[in-house]
Amino acid sequence: MRFRLLFFSVFIATAFASCTNSDKQFTIKGEIEGMPEQTLYLEELGIDKITILDSVKSSTSGKFELEGKTPEEGLFRITFSADKKKTILLSAEKGNITVKSNWATLEPITISGSES
């Protein structure tokens, strides 16, 4: 009887452990030269929906930091409140990502740090 109780306890503990949230954290630090102070949005692009993961107000010098979580590699975009037509598309999985660009054209854009 004790063996069955021990086996059942181990089974339940294993089941709960496998159900834990395995999302991977990533941080996007950016600097966009000449960008006016505004709100930036980090959006996850899904197959049938777009989800806002984070938003932040940029500094007057164009610096910002956004954070997100994802269970696997995903497609994301950064949108800007001052100009809805401008976006930055990127793939992320985990870790620190750096974005650098110029507000006038958003080109060239440098994205580094992401393995994906």
Image (cartoon, rainbow, N blue to C red):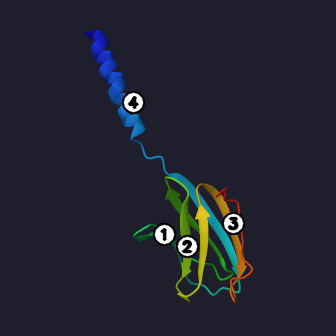
Q: Quadrant of residue 27?
A: bottom right
Q: Earlier in the sequence, mark 2 or mark 1?
A: 1
Classify mark 1: residues with Cα within 10 Å, few (<14), some (14-19) or many (20+): some
Quickly name the residue at label 3: 98
Quickly name the residue at label 4: 14
* Identity, as a three-letter code, of the amino acid under mark 2: Arg
Q: CA distance from mark 2 to mark 1?
A: 7 Å
* Identity, as a three-letter code, of the amino acid under mark 1: Leu
Q: Earlier in the sequence, mark 4 or mark 2?
A: 4
Q: Is residue 62 above or below residue 12?
A: below
Q: Quadrant of residue 80?
A: bottom right
| SS under mark 1 | strand
Quickly name the residue at label 1: 45
Q: Earlier in the sequence, mark 3 or mark 2?
A: 2
Tell me the number on the disc at residue 77: 2
Residue 39: x percent and y percent?
A: 53, 80
Q: Are marks 3 and 4 in contact (CB under 8 Å)?
A: no
